[in-house]
Structure formats: C-alpha cells, structure tokens
Image: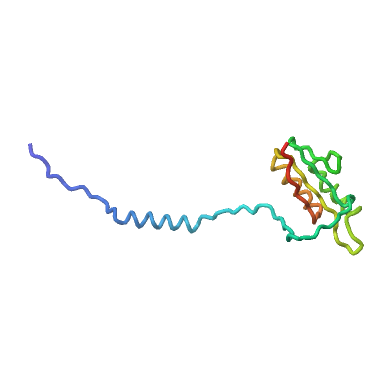
Amino acid sequence: MLSKPRRELGGFSSSSMADIAFLLLVFFLVTTTISMDKGINLVLPQPEDTEIAIPPQNITNILINQAGKILMNDKVVQVRDIAREADRAIKQRGFTPDGKQIMIFSVKPHAHTKYDIYIQVLDQLKVAGAQKISIANPDES
C-alpha cells in the first residue's frame, strides 16, 4: 500500500496571545467602576476646653435596647415616629430667642443593638432637622 505523504498541520502563533491578554486586562481596568461606600455624613465639632451647661429640658434622650425597642424621653416609640416626635420637640423648646437650635438629641444604644436600627434612628433625626446629635457610648451589660 502506498501511504499518503504527511502534511504538517497549521498552527497558530502564540506570540500575540500575551498582547491580547494585556489589552483585555487594560480594557477591563479602564471600564470597571469601583463603588465607594459613602458612610454616615456627620460633622464632628472641634474639641473645646470649656463645658456648657445645658438645661435638662433641652436634651431629648433616645435609648435603644438590644431588641431594637426605642425609648424617647421614657416613652416607647417606633422608628417611623421619631422624626415627628423630634420635630415636635424642636418646635416646642428647641430654639433660642435669636433663632439658634439648642435642642440636643442624645442617642444611646445598647452594645448589642443592631446597626440597622441605630442608623434608622439617626436618619429620622436628620429628617426632623436635628442639628445637634450626641452619640453616647453603648452600655456593656
């Protein structure tokens, strides 16, 4: 039998593979956007050496327990009601005669309070227009 002459099979050049991979890498790096978390927008006051006496009627205490229950001046409130209650407190006794807001909201969570509830409380205070929010250290017990 006669055998057919063997032909060399065509191959491909792998030298351009590195170029293609590099171009794809550059393309994906340029077109990909990285989302940055914005976090909580709080303006912290400058440290001062002087202490100011605040009358108790100008402080609204907000306590959050580990189950997510909220006490606002010893009254149980829902998260959705905080903005209304805070707005009422600001309008009743929260301004000086020259128009400056003096109502301070002191938020004190429990050490095991869910972060989501805590953020919702802060958001509701911002909705109400609270300008002075005190964040107290959580209870360890």
Residue 41 relative to residue 16: left or right: right
**Between residues 33 and 52, which one lies in front from this camera angle?**
52
Residue 91: image quadrant is bottom right
Number of numbered tags placed on the structure image: 0
Residue at 35% across / 57% down in the picture?
A: 19
Is residue 42 depicted above or below 139 in this figure? below
**Between residues 134 and 120, which one lies in front from this camera angle?**
134
Work out which quarter of the rendered image holds the C terminus and state it. top right
Residue at 27% across / 54% down in the picture?
A: 13
**Between residues 45 and 77, which one lies in front from this camera angle?**
45
Judging from the image, the colouring scheme is rainbow
Residue 64: image quadrant is top right
Farthest-out residue, front: 49
Whole-percent x and y of residue 26?
Answer: 43, 58
Whole-percent x and y of residue 88?
Answer: 88, 50
Whole-percent x and y of residue 120?
Answer: 74, 45
Work out which quarter of the rendered image holds the N terminus and state it. top left
Residue at 83% across / 53% down in the picture?
A: 104
Residue 117 relative to residue 76: left or right: left
Farthest-out residue, left: 1
Residue at 86% across / 40% down in the picture?
A: 74
Is residue 111 depicted above or below 99 in this figure? above
Residue 128 relative to residue 22: left or right: right
Whole-percent x and y of residue 136?
Answer: 76, 47
